[in-house]
Image: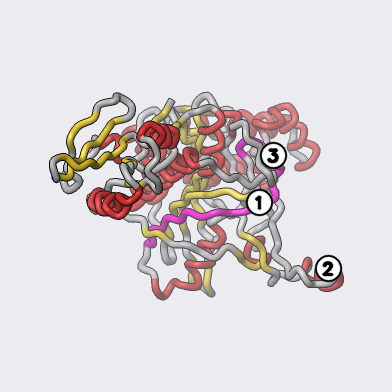
Amino acid sequence: MSRKASLSGFHEWLPAERIVEQHVLDTLRTTFELHGFSSIETRAVETLGQLLRKGDIDKEVYAVSRLQADPGERAEQAEDPNRLALHFDLTVPFARYVVENAGHLSFPFRRYQIQKVWRGERPQEGRAREFTQADIDVVGDGSLPFRYDVDVALVMAEALAALPIGDFTIRINNRKLAEGFYRGLGLTDTAGVLRNIDKLEKIGPAEVSRLLQSELGATADQADQALALAAIRTQDTSFVERVRALGVTHNLLDEGLEELAAVVGELHRRAPGRAVADLSIARGLDYYTGTVYETVLAGHEQLGSICSGGRYDALAAKGNRTFPGVGLSIGVTRLLMRMFSTQMATASRSVPTAVYVALTHDDDWSAAQDTARALRSRGIPTEVAVSAEKFGKQIKYADRRGIPFVWFTRTDDGQTVHEVKDIRSGEQVPADPQAWMPPHEDLRPRVTGA
């Protein structure tokens, strides 16, 4: 895309781009529903206390204030946990939704949610301030069988494979594995180690090692071991032996190894080539407690993750009742930005219209509407000309819009004759508005990959 947004970080797609976006969203909806996920929508705002109760995030949250509030009131609001703010993801609002509606839901509850979210990002390719996410989650009441960790990964692999985005890799790790390994090394601030390991791709191993030693008090050997763990990457369960070879032991490490092997092993069997055990994946948000996922596009790794998530056991709770869950989120807008900038996917036309009904005389407009109604009744998107200009001009108008067929009506010996012209090939044939159908590939705009 060469167009510049009039408001940085807030995208508005052209009609052909919007068709691609709708294709992506419809494909995701179809896949999610085929796997039994129910659609929900949560409100756009939450309280600041709700959004930030599981730890700060490294993105600015957009707070919502009354425009007429004076400076003193605004200063008070800034410290008020009940102040409203736009949600920065869909997982935290979903956790609140589950708690408030638990009495009306059947568990395990399978939900998908496609909505806009807002973050104070520095706008650049892959990062916007207003963007669309598509999430799936499974939440249990009190407990959630581990197999759902495998289930959501398989669903997302199927959904992404149905999009015109080329090859991708789901990178998977387990927080129990990482935390158990660090504890086995004698590093007690496991959250701090994870935060630094999460910076590995941005700042490199040497700088991460320095931070582990200077900020967390790790020895050089401990830092080397932590980096050695992060360097392990396999497409099958052979990572287990490689971790064991590092000589670190801990009960939590054993549990994490077993869980990660189950996820990677099943994906290796059912979606070969789509997943890899990557022990550098940490995920910055601290509500994750087990499996974590990140997904990158082949050849576009610099874009970062287009789909991420994981297991969270304590994000949603009501008294003594907990609602553990696992889920994944696709950054739809991030994905679309790359699709458009690289022409990864294109629409066959920029309008839904398949047929343009031309007018011979202005008085034919009402009869042309009858023809259009007959076509629309069978699901054929149809427009009617508003004036009887020369046929050549009407055809040029349809061609400029990308409409493949023009419909003509004339009177021959007192009989109404209908003909339809494929303006791409020039072929014009008799047609019955009660029965004619365009080729299937022309009925709706098609989205194809590069």
Q: Nearer the viewer, mark 2 or mark 3?
A: 2
On residue 75, the disc is 2
Disc 2 on helix, strand or loop? helix
- What is the CA distance from the residue labelled 2 to the residue labelled 1? 21 Å
Is 381 one of the magenta-colored residues? no
Is 116 one of the magenta-colored residues? yes
At label 3, the amino acid type is Asn
Q: Which residue is labeled 1 in the image?
A: 119
Q: Earlier in the sequence, mark 1 or mark 3?
A: 1
Where residue 404 appears, as percent x and y from the top left, is 33, 34
Depth check: give the residue in front, 172 or 158: 158
Disc 3 on helix, strand or loop? helix
Q: Earlier in the sequence, mark 2 or mark 1?
A: 2
Q: Is residue 348 visible?
A: no
At label 1, the amino acid type is Arg
Where residue 192 appears, as percent x and y from the top left, is 70, 45
- What is the CA distance from the residue labelled 1 to the residue labelled 3? 22 Å
Q: How many marks?
A: 3
Part of the protein shown in magenta: 108-126
At label 2, the amino acid type is Ala
Mark 3 surroundings within 10 Å by alpha-carbon count, few (fewer than 14), some (14 through 19), many (20 or more): many
Q: Is residue 198 visible?
A: yes
Please state, as top left, top right, bottom left or bottom right, where the N terminus lies in the image: top right
Q: 66 above or below 314? A: below
Please report the residue visible at 44 percent of the width from the left and 42 percent of the height from the top: 19
Q: Which residue is labeled 3 in the image?
A: 196
Disc 1 on helix, strand or loop? loop
